[in-house]
Image (cartoon, rainbow, N blue to C red):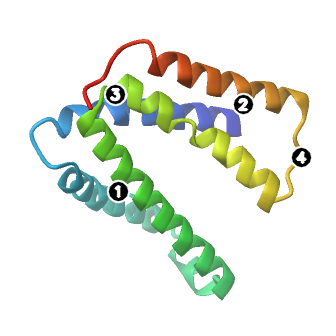
């Protein structure tokens, strides 16, 4: 079932890129992200409350809070930088480079979480890097 959710997340992320690029056309990228962040906050807390999961906050330990705060900061920085890149460049080019986050995520997972690499993962990483480079050189983008 995780595959279905992962593919739906990829579909939503692809749509978000195109909608964000269209939305920031005539406005500051940071302001556009701030508007989206309010919606993210409202929707995510609505889901938590609807699922009656808010009581779980009391069960979080200090270490979990630190990891979630760190992830929140990283997510915010990533989004702000992505919005700025989208404002300046073509969505297809920006996204191809931004999705190299997958390569970094694998590297971080191997180093910090002690996940194992196999030849399929290594080939996949090389293909992702090659694909990003190929797409980035496929057309020129305004700087």
From the viewer's perspective, is the residue at label 4 or at label 2 nearer? 2
Q: Which residue is mark 4?
A: 116
The N terminus, quarter of image: top right
Marks 3 and 2, how far apart at CA: 22 Å
Q: Is residue 55 left or right of residue 25?
A: right
Q: Which residue is mark 1?
A: 40
In the rendered structure, are the residues bearing label 4 and label 2 in contact, judged by CB atoms less than 8 Å apart?
A: no
Q: Nearer the viewer, residue 35 or 92?
A: 92
Q: Is residue 20 visible?
A: no
Q: Nearer the viewer, residue 56 or 29?
A: 29
Q: Label 4: how many residues lie within 10 Å, few (<14), some (14-19) or many (20+)? A: few
Q: Which residue is mark 3?
A: 91
Who's the residue at 18% across and 40% down the image?
A: 24
Marks 1 and 3, how far apart at CA: 21 Å
Which picture quadrant has residue 134? top right
Marks 1 and 2, how far apart at CA: 30 Å
Marks 4 and 3, how far apart at CA: 33 Å
Query: Residue 100 location in percent, x, y?
Result: 57, 36
On screen, residue 81 above or below 98? below
Of mark 3 and mark 2, the one earlier in the sequence is: 3
Query: Residue 104 location in percent, x, y?
Result: 65, 46
Query: Residue 8 location in percent, x, y?
Result: 53, 33
Q: Is residue 113 left or right of residue 56?
A: right
Q: Label 1: how many residues lie within 10 Å, few (<14), some (14-19) or many (20+)? A: few
Of mark 4 and mark 2, the one earlier in the sequence is: 4
Query: Residue 51 location in percent, x, y?
Result: 51, 63
Who's the residue at 64% across and 87% down the image?
A: 62
The C terminus, quarter of image: top left
Who's the residue at 48% across and 66% down the image?
A: 72
Q: Which residue is mark 2?
A: 125
Marks 4 and 2, how far apart at CA: 14 Å
């Amino acid at each position: 079932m995780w595959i279905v959710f992962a593919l739906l997340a990829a579909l939503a992320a692809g749509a978000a890129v195109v909608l964000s690029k269209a939305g920031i056309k005539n406005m500051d990228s940071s302001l556009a992200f701030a508007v989206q962040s309010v919606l993210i906050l409202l929707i995510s807390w609505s889901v938590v409350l609807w699922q009656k999961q808010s009581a779980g906050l009391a069960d979080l330990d200090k270490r979990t809070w630190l990891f979630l705060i760190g992830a929140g900061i990283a997510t915010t920085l990533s989004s702000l930088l992505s919005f700025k890149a989208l404002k300046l460049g073509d969505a297809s080019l920006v996204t191809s480079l931004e999705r190299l986050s997958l390569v970094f995520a694998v590297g971080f997972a191997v180093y910090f979480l002690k996940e194992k690499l196999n030849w399929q993962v290594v080939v996949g990483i090389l293909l992702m890097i090659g694909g990003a480079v190929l797409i980035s050189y496929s057309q020129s983008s305004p700087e």
